[in-house]
Every structure is written in C-alpha cells, then in structure tokens.
Amino acid sequence: MQKKLWPAVAIAAAVSAAAHAEMPPPGLDFAPMSTVLNAFASAAAHRRAETLVNKMTIDEKLQFIHSEYAMSAVPGGGAGYIQGVPRLGIPDLNMVDSATGSGSTNQPSTTFPATLAVAASWDRALSWNFGKQIAIQLRQQGFGMGLGGGTNLAREPRGGRLFEYLGEDPVLAGEMLAERTDGTQSQKVIATIKHYMGNEQEHNRGGGNSQIDERTMRELYLLPFEIAARRAQPGSVMCSYNEVNGTYACENSHILNDVLKNDWHFEGQVQSDWGAAHSTAAAINAGLDEEEDVGSTVYLTPTLVKQAIANGSVSTARLDDMVERKLYVMIRTGVMDDPPKGGATIDFSAARAFTQSVEEQSMVLLKNASNQLPLSAGSLSRIAVIGGHADAAVLTGGGSGNTRDPVTGAFAGCGGLTFGTSTGCSWWTNPWLKLNTPIVSAIKALAPQATVTFAGNSDQQSPFAAYTQQQITQAATLAANSDVAIVVVAQPAGEDIGDLPSLGLANPTNQDALVEAVAAANPHTIVVVESGNPVLMPWKDSVSAIVEAWYPGEGGGNAIANVLFGKVNPSGKLPVTFPMRDQDTPTWGTNGAFAANPVYSEKLDMGYRWYDSQNITPMFEFGYGLSYTHFAYSGLSVQHLPGGLIDVSFNVRNDGRVAGAEVPQVYLGVPYQGEPPRRLVGWDKVGLNPGESRRVHVVVTQRMQSVWDTTSNRWRYVPGSSVYVGASSRDIRLQGHG
Ligand code: BGC
C-alpha cells in the first residue's frame, strides 16, 4: 500500500525546506488549497479506509474496482455506478458527466456555458464557483461524483472537444481546473480530472498513439494535471483512450505510477475512460484502480481479477490499495458519511442567473472599430438580428460534455426546437438549446423603442442547412434598412464526431458569405460568434465589431444582449490563439490531414508559443480581449524573494470612462535551449472604476522559472529570465529581468 502520511509530512517538510534551502521542493510551487489541518483529516481518512478494507470480503473489494453497469442501466441517468456495502456503512456511488452541467440522461439539469468560456474569464473565483454550482445540482440529483474536469490542451485547435477544456496554456488550464475541482469537492462531490493524457484530438480517438517527448510532456501536457492534482487533490484522474509513446494510457506505468502516484504523490484513484482499459494485470500493475464498463470488452471483472490474483500476476496488496484509494476519496470528500440522496428540488432560476453571470464574464470583445459597441438603445430605431437561430436558441457542444435537456430531462433531440432529428440535429452531435430569452427577445427588452427584426433562418429549417442565396439577399436588404445589423454565426463541435475539418465556419457552409453580404449592406455590422474552437474570420476587416460568445449556456441570450448594450463591460481574454488561416496552425502539416498517431514534433512550441517562435502573426493572440474602457500599465518592479521566488509588481490604471476589469498577464522568457520566447507564469483579474489604479503583485515560483532537464530527469531552475507584463501574449506593456 501507499505511504499514508504524505500530505502532513510533505507540507511540513516543504515549509521548512523553503525557509532554509535554495530550491524548494516542487510541492510548494503548487501549494495545496486545503490547509495543513486538512492534511491530518486526510491521514485519518486513510486509516479509516484501511480499516474498512480489512473488513471487506474479496467479492466486496472486487465490486469497488469495476463499474459493471452499462450506461443505459445506470441509476439516475448517470454514466457509472458502484454498489455500496451496507453492512459496513459504505453507500452506493453514482457518477455522471458534468463538463457544462449534469449529463444525466433522465433528469432536468441546467446548461452552463462551455468550460472553455470559463477559461476565457481568467477568473479563479468564478471557476471555483462554477465547480460548486454544478456540484450542487449533481448532489440534488443523487450523484456523488462528477466527471467534468476536462483539461487536455488545445494543441489541435480543430479538436472536437476543445469546448470541454481550458485552452492552450498549461498554467491557465491547471489553475482554473484546480479551482473548479476544489469548488466541486466543497459540495461533497468527488471530482474527476481527465483525459490523462496526450488525448488532444478526436481523430482515431479509440487508440491513436500520441508520441510526446518527456520534456514536452512535463512542461506542457502533464502540467495542468499536475497543478490540479497537487493543489486541489481531485478524488479521481481518468486515463484516456489513446496510447502514450506506444502504451495505452490506462496501462502506462510511467504516467500513472511514476509521474502521477510517485512524483506527484496523488492519493486518489485512477479510473479508466469508458472502455479505455485493455488488460487486467498489466493495467492494474501500471496503476489503473477502476475500470468503467461500456458493456463490451471488460478487464477488471471479478472473474478476471480473481484469476490474476490466483496466478500471481496481481497481488492482494495491490487490490487492497485500489479499494483503499476509492474508500479514502469517499471519506475525505464526505460522500461516505453524507451520501447524496437525490430527488431534491433544484432552484433552476438561481442556476440560470449564475450561468448568465459566468457568460457575462467570459465573452471576449475581439474588435470594436470606432467604439461601435456598446450600442445605445435610445439612438437606434431599427435593429436587424440575422442568422444563428438567434430568435430561438444557442449552440452547445455535443457528446458527453453536453447537458441533455434543461427543462424536461428527456432527450429532446434538438433542444426543444421544432426542427427534428431528421434535419441532422441530435442531442449528441449537433445540439441546439432553446432559450426562454433568446438573443432577439433579450435585445427587444433592452431596446423597447426600437423595431427588432430577425432574418436568416427558421426553426423548420435544419440548423446546418446552408443559407440560400434568397436568405442572404433578404438579410442584406434588412441590414440595409436598419441602423445596425447583428449577425450571429455558429460553429458546432463535439465528442465522437471527429475534429473540425477547418477552423472556417463550415456548418452551415456559407456563413462567411452571409456576413460579407450584410457587412456590404450596413457599415454598422456586429458579429457574435458561438463556438467552442477558434474561428477563421475572412470578413474581419469588413465588420465593425466582433464578440466571441463561446457556447454560452442557457443564460446566453441575456448575457450577449447585456454586453452588446453595455450593461456588462466585457472582460474575457482568449484562452486559445485565433489564427489567420488553418495553414498557420502547428498541426496542419501540408494538407490538414489528421495524424492517426500524432507526433508532437513542435515540442514546446504549441499554442501561442508556436506563433511567437515561428514569427507568424495570428488574427487574435492568446490572452487578447478588448474592453469598453482602457488600461494603462506602469511602474514595473521585479524583486527577488527568499526561495528563488520573484515578486513582479506593477500598476494598472483604468484611464477610460467606465468601470471595467483587466487581466494583466506575466510571461517569462526563460534563457534555455528549446524554450519558447514567452510562457505564461501568472496573472490577476482586477476590477477598476474610472481613474482607479491598483498595484498588482504576481509571485513567480522557482518551478515556473524551471525547465525539465532530460539528463537528470528533474526540474532545473534557470535564473535570469526576461519578465514581460502584458495585456495579452503580444501586447507587452512592461519589460524587466528576473
Ligand atoms: C468520454 C468521457 C466521459 C465518458 C462517460 C467517454 O466517451 O470520453 O469524457 O466521461 O464517456 O460518459
């Protein structure tokens, strides 16, 4: 079994080492969010779990390492189920997907904005609350475990599941995931983080071999998991479908045993993605603790594990460790003593208000020529709203990251719209969500004196049918006769339907033509984008304003209208680069074909690091986003603190005329071969009234100044980094030396 007293001992050791030694142990860099006192609770939980394991029969133990219910049979419409042991007071455990709200297939749930939107808020407290609010509904529905913590990096910008993740930077993604995880577990719901690891594309999703060198893994793809695992101690890490360097992730001893359990001291359990286990003894000995069944081939069944124990390929000590990990997590999170009962009344209107506030803090203002936005209701008499089913619905992401039906809990096909599945719309692949207050109604409420007219498409038409020439002409005519034209474009994506062939607005195919025609007819054209990926915008220079609204969730109509009319000042910043062309992205290659077995040959030059190192100008860079006010930066100071820490401090002043929030970002240029020009090491989000100024401090740990040294197989501190403070990864306002 694992050593039990790690957290208390390690924290004490880390604190004392930091006071005396030059290089603090890595644990201190990602200090646990819970307190030292909690570490004692954790040790007690281990002791209690161990006592329970000692009382369990072999059959009871085997019940805890395999969710044997095919998904269609899981109680409460969840994704997996572990039966409890009443004689020992161990309750049942129901798990469910929860990326953007509960994924229960038969209970009503709230649809929150896409996880990528939360990353765009760069607001740690918001991410914590996001995890908490979703967990409240999970418990009310009877679920003790939420599978929503996706954090694969956006290496492949066309990735079908990007909306479920947290962008292209490992520190932003890791910090936001740690917050979300802690928020979830604060509600006595076990949080899973996924998909561990190298699972950055959907193409060949069942078993592609991701080939990633160790340094690139440590510095990029493992890092968000490391930050979340160390800081928030999620109950579970889900290993992914793919292979990592030739071995399936769920039987890869290097990433499970060496890195996760040994290097990071992870005390929770490793669960497989659904159907991602490929062996019995090999997987168990490599670190897999629980298999999730998809009703087909299974490996951690009672029969097979008993055989493996009998023939000596799996030890009883290892079985005990697997079960102990699960029980420990149930005890530590509170699920053991206070299991969710389900059947509780959910406050859907409070949840909707919360989803709206998340969206309001996540939208990114990409362009605002001549201060076209915010719109002034009093000066507009004719407003055209065009396309994107903006009179009825918003787009959500597809697959297990979708939230089924927020009103009835049933599979409503296309979110309650009148177009049916025969039109190519389904809850899994192309989900649209009917809103109580769609964009058109929300705009009408904010501009009651104006005539608001919608054109473009109707509910009866497939949401993926191309706009006809007649519809485009009608839309342009309406725009020509309006004071302002708001065009909504949408890019569907989701799990298990492949990656996007292009970042262009492929579906409906001629949305670009629609935007161009409207922009030619009206100089005051504003584009609202609903997407879970970066989008190409060949019409960028023809329109006057662009707002990225992501998949905005069920408060999206009001949130979008509030930003357009200035009730909310946008403060989101891009968590992914928006390139000019597909050809500029690191994974496009010669013809955009997806690799069945991707080689991560760009190494550390992924995301903005790619554009910076290759000198490619993106359309909108990582970290970019405008506001209705502006901010001035001054007074940089870089102070060295004991333990190799650097305190980067500077002033940010709102020198515009409205209140707003800025996200000042700190990047380092680490002087070491192979490092990109800049890497994000910290940020803050500060709300400022007009004329107000704040001194911002971002403390950079030694680990953030380190590289993975492949010779010694350890982190190596590299002194003397360049320090950049920016309003984005390219809009650098202040510069100094560390
Ligand atoms: C997905 C996971 C999900 C699981 C259970 C799998 O297909 O990859 O993200 O949690 O299904 O629904």
Image: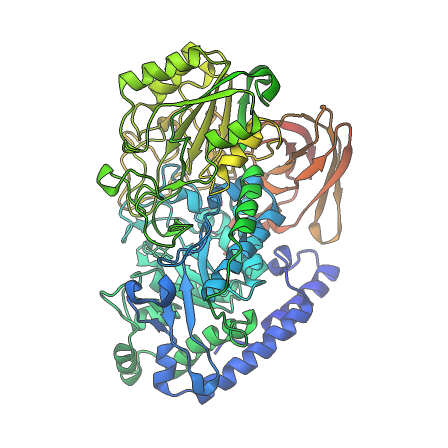
Measuring from the top left, give residue 206's x and y in whole percent.
27, 53
Left or right: residue 534 versus residue 381 is left
- Ligand 1 image position (quadrant): bottom left
User: Is residue 162 toward the left or the right of residue 735 in the image?
Assistant: left
Q: Nearer the viewer, residue 408 or 371?
A: 408
Q: Is residue 166 visible?
A: no
Res. 409 visible in picture: yes
Residue in the image at 29% along x and 23% along y: 467
Image-quadrant location for residue 462 = top left
Q: Residue at x 53, y 20 (%)?
A: 450
Horizontal side of residue 369 vs 405, given as left or right: right
Q: Is residue 280 above or below residue 179?
A: below
Query: How is colour applied across the structure in the image?
Result: rainbow
At x 71%, y 60%, the residue is: 18
Where does the image place residue 457, in percent across and percent down from the top left? Answer: 33, 27
Q: How many marks?
A: 0
Seen in the picture, residue 665 relative to 202 is either above or below; the reply is: above
Give the image quarter of residue 693. top right
Q: Is residue 350 above or below residue 609?
A: below
Describe residue 619's horizontal placement relative to residue 302 as left or right. right
Image position, residue 188 (x, y; %): 55, 66
- Say which quarter of the image contains residue 93: bottom left
Give percent across and percent down for residue 557.
49, 35
Image quarter where the C terminus lies is top right
Point out the residue furthest to the front here.
449
Q: Residue at x 40, y 26 (%)?
A: 536
> For this rendering, which residue is in front, 242 or 705?
242
Residue nearest the viewer, comparing 215 with 700: 700
Q: Nearer the viewer, residue 88 or 685?
A: 88
